[in-house]
Amino acid sequence: MFWRTCRETAVAALLLTSIEGTQVVLRPFVDADITPAYLGWLNDPVATRYSNQRFRSHSHATSQRYLASFEGTQNLFLSVRRRADGTPLGTMTAYVAEEHGTADMGILIGERTCWGQGYGLDAWQALMRWLLAERGLRKVTAGTLDCNLPMRRLAERSGMHEEGARRRQEIVDGREHDILLFARFRDA
């Protein structure tokens, strides 16, 4: 076990109301967030081009089931909102392994009009800081396909380092691609 007990970190997760970045606010995703815009992001072949979400059809019912899968766990499912006006921009997840002091993060900025404006990086850095400092985890990880250049840049710009790869793991547009594994340690 690492320096914080599981009980202390569970309390920190339960008390989470929001995490603030400079451009975004992250807050727990709730049923009311399952909107036509959200479903549109999940069913957008461009927004999910590098995600395994592209193989599924998403509805209100499937989204409710996914949201319910977070109940009673240490994992986080967050709504990413523009700080200036509260507009929903996307979602983030953090799958936590308390016993190991780790979390694996994911992000979807589904609002295409906001791509390339730094919202994703701001959200990523805000959640990573919170997981490492407030939640007291020792390591945060993420994986992305080698062909997903925006996500690779986001990981690198956030201070994560590539620590390995799963070679020829997934197929995109008929071609084999590696999954690159990134990490950042609390004491880095």
Image (cartoon, rainbow, N blue to C red):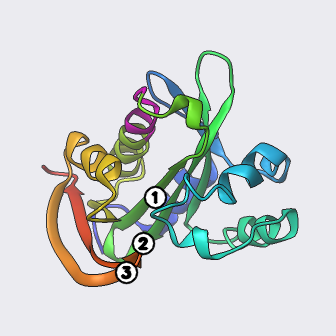
Q: Residue at x 15, y 51 (%)?
A: 187
Looking at the image, is 72 positioned above or below residue 152? below
Q: Residue at x 76, y 67 (%)?
A: 58
**Residue 106 — which label?**
1
Amino acid type shown at disc 3: Glu
Q: Please tell me how crowded label 3 is: few (under 14), some (14-19), or many (20+) other residues with Cα within 10 Å.
A: some
Hey, which residue is sitting farthest front in the picture? 174
Q: Nearer the viewer, mark 3 or mark 1?
A: 3
Q: In terms of depth relative to the viewer, which is nearer, 23 or 7?
A: 23
Q: Give the main secondary structure, helix, strand or loop, of the magenta stretch.
A: helix
Name the residue type under label 1: Gly
Location of residue 173 in the rendering, given as x and y in whole percent from the top left corner:
42, 72
| Cα distance in 3D space between marks 3 and 1 | 17 Å
Distance CA(mark 2)–CA(mark 1): 22 Å
Task: Tell me what residue is drawn at x 43 percent, y 44 percent.
Answer: 127
**Label 3 vs 1, first from the N-terminus:** 1
The residue labelled by disc 2 is: 173
Q: Which residues are magenta?
A: 117-123
Residue 112 at x, y percent in the picture: 57, 37
Q: Mark 2, residues whose alpha carbon is within 10 Å: few (<14), some, or many (≥20)? A: few
Tell me if 51 is positioned left or right of 139 in this view: right
